[in-house]
Each structure stands twice: as structure tokens, then as C-alpha cells.
Image (tube, grey):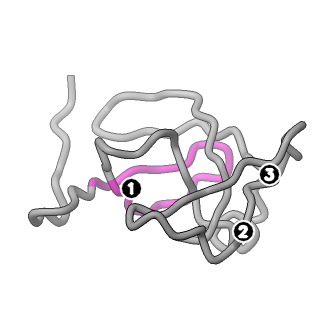
Amino acid sequence: MATVTIATINANSLQIDCSLKQKTIGTKALIDSGATDNFMDTKFAIRHRLPLQKLPTPITCKNVDGTTNKNGKITHCTYQRIDAGGQNRFTKFLLTGL
């Protein structure tokens, strides 16, 4: 197993380097053990022309403080193969404003 390099760590987050394999995009991933799912910023997905898939039912997204997310309901997702720390997984990401 390869070593995971921690890029940034503080009391609220842990970031690691990762790559999205479908288009080989180097980026950082925020590891949030309190999240209810995997999320990706909508603008990031559009900027990198990742394939988007419409959800059958929109999802209401709430921020940690209970407010509704600035982008409103989640209507799309993307499926990406990610490589982080030597592990490679096919992952569904819900798209919203981060």
C-alpha cells in the first residue's frame, strides 16, 4: 500500500492529493468524516467537462449550520474513478456548491 501524503490538516479538515482518472485531473480532496455522501463542486465538474448524470429525484442539500446550500437542490451527479494514496475507486459524486 502506498503512503497517503497529507497536504493540509487543521481542526476541521484533512486534505489529500488525488487524481480523477477519467480525465487525469490533479486536485485535492477534502476528507470530511461528517459528510453524508461524496460531493464535488458543480463549477469544478463543468470546468473540467466531466460527464454529468441527472438524478431521478432532486436532493435538498443542507449545510452544516442547517441552512440550505446556495446552489439549491442537487440535480446531478458524476461518476469518477479516483486515485488517492495508491487506492483506486469508482465513486459517485453529488454536485453542489462547495
Q: Measuring from the top left, give residue 11's x and y in whole percent.
A: 10, 63
Residue 19 lies in magenta, yes or no?
yes
The span shown in magenta is 16-30
Figure check: 75 above or below 2: below
Q: Callout 1: helix, strand or loop?
A: strand
Query: In 3D space, how far apart are the residues under numbered discs 2 and 1 (Cα atoms)?
Result: 22 Å
Q: Characterize the local packing of mark 2: few (<14), some (14-19) or many (20 or more) Cα atoms within 10 angstroms.
A: some
- The residue to which callout 1 is attached is 29
Q: Main secondary structure of the magenta part?
A: strand
For the residue marked with disc 1, what is the amino acid?
A: Ala
- The residue to which callout 2 is attached is 72
In percent of the image, x 63 and y 36: which residue is there?
Answer: 92
For the residue marked with disc 2, what is the amino acid?
A: Gly
Q: Callout 2: helix, strand or loop?
A: loop
* Quadrant of the rendered image containing residue 43: bottom right
Residue 33 lies in magenta, yes or no?
no
Q: Callout 3: helix, strand or loop?
A: strand
Q: Earlier in the sequence, mark 2 or mark 1?
A: 1
